[in-house]
Amino acid sequence: MSSATSTMIPRFLIPQYGCIWQRSTQNFIQRRLASTKSTSEANTTASGPRVLAKPERFNPPSHGSRLPNKKNLPRHYGGDLSFQEKQAQAQKEYPGLMPGEGTYGWWFWNNKWFHMCLTLGTLFSLAIYTATENFKRTSPFADMLPAKGDFFSHPIDSFQHLGHVIRLHEAHKSAEISAKRQRAIDDVAKRTMYRKAHGLPEEQGVMGFIKLKEPERIASVERGVMATEAAAASAPVAKEGEQKQEQQRQ
């Protein structure tokens, strides 16, 4: 009775792992040492190295197997878009992309006159700021400049006063330059007189072997000084000649 009931038990109800199946699986398990090779490996090594099949063509992984064709454009079913829909689609702004044509963003990024005026205005404002700061730090008439608020309340008077201050600054600068030139001319005249008094040559040497001449400006000054000296030296001679002529006439 027990044998009949055991044969009537369905297979899926019996556990798949356990002592029941050990005897049947032991016959199929083969033990192999790690130093030996299996028969499948021996067969593959004997036949030769495994070679992969050559592909028909090179297909880059970043591209699809079929590239888009210009002749076969994608078709949109449901009819063509209207003019208003196409215009609205062109003016629509997408994140990460340039704005569509006809929008304010497209005009801002593609208008050359706007960018030129913006660049020139920035450079002009920086130049005015630099000139103003330089004038305040270098000019002795910086205290006479009108205040910033006066340019808005009284613009005409402020600009006239600013022009007057600039003229004073230029006159002061010209006076300093002329005084500096006069000092240089006096220095050249003194050196020329010193050389003539001590019999030194006109050329001067640097480190004893390099000969340097005076610049053209200094040479012209020297010529002017020599002309004045010659005129001063010839003046008494001319006076003596005039006195002799007067005596002969008498």
Image (spheres, helix red, strand yellow):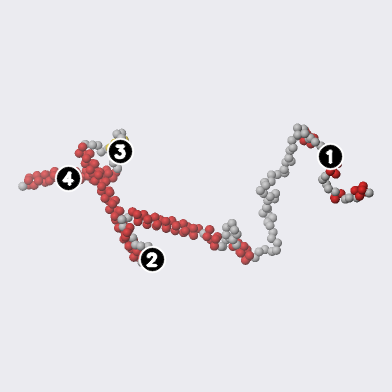
Q: Nearer the viewer, mark 3 or mark 4?
A: 3
Q: Earlier in the sequence, mark 4 or mark 1?
A: 1
Q: List the residue tagged with mark 1.
A: 26
Q: Earlier in the sequence, mark 2 or mark 3?
A: 2
Along the viewing direction, whichever of 50 and 214 lies nearer the viewer: 50
Alpha-carbon span between mark 2 and mark 4 = 63 Å
Q: List the residue tagged with mark 2.
A: 152
Above or below — where is 8 with respect to 41? below
Residue 47: % across, % down: 77, 34
153 relative position to 29: left or right? left
Residue at 15% across, 45% down: 235
Q: Nearer the viewer, mark 3 or mark 1?
A: 1
Alpha-carbon span between mark 3 and mark 4 = 30 Å
Residue type highlighted by circle 3: Leu
Q: List the residue tagged with mark 4.
A: 232
Find out whether the residues at labels 3 and 4 contact each other: C-beta distance under 8 Å: no
**Mark number displayed over residue 177:** none
Residue at 94% across, 49% down: 1
118 relative position to 22: left or right? left
Along the viewing direction, whichever of 8 and 94 lies nearer the viewer: 8
Residue 23: % across, % down: 85, 41
133 relative position to 64: left or right? left
Residue extending farthest left:
250
Near mark 2 (Cα within 10 A), the count class, few <14, some 14-19 or many ≥20, is few
Near mark 4 (Cα within 10 A), the count class, few <14, some 14-19 or many ≥20, is few
**Quadrant of residue 81 in the image?**
bottom right
Q: Earlier in the sequence, mark 3 or mark 1?
A: 1
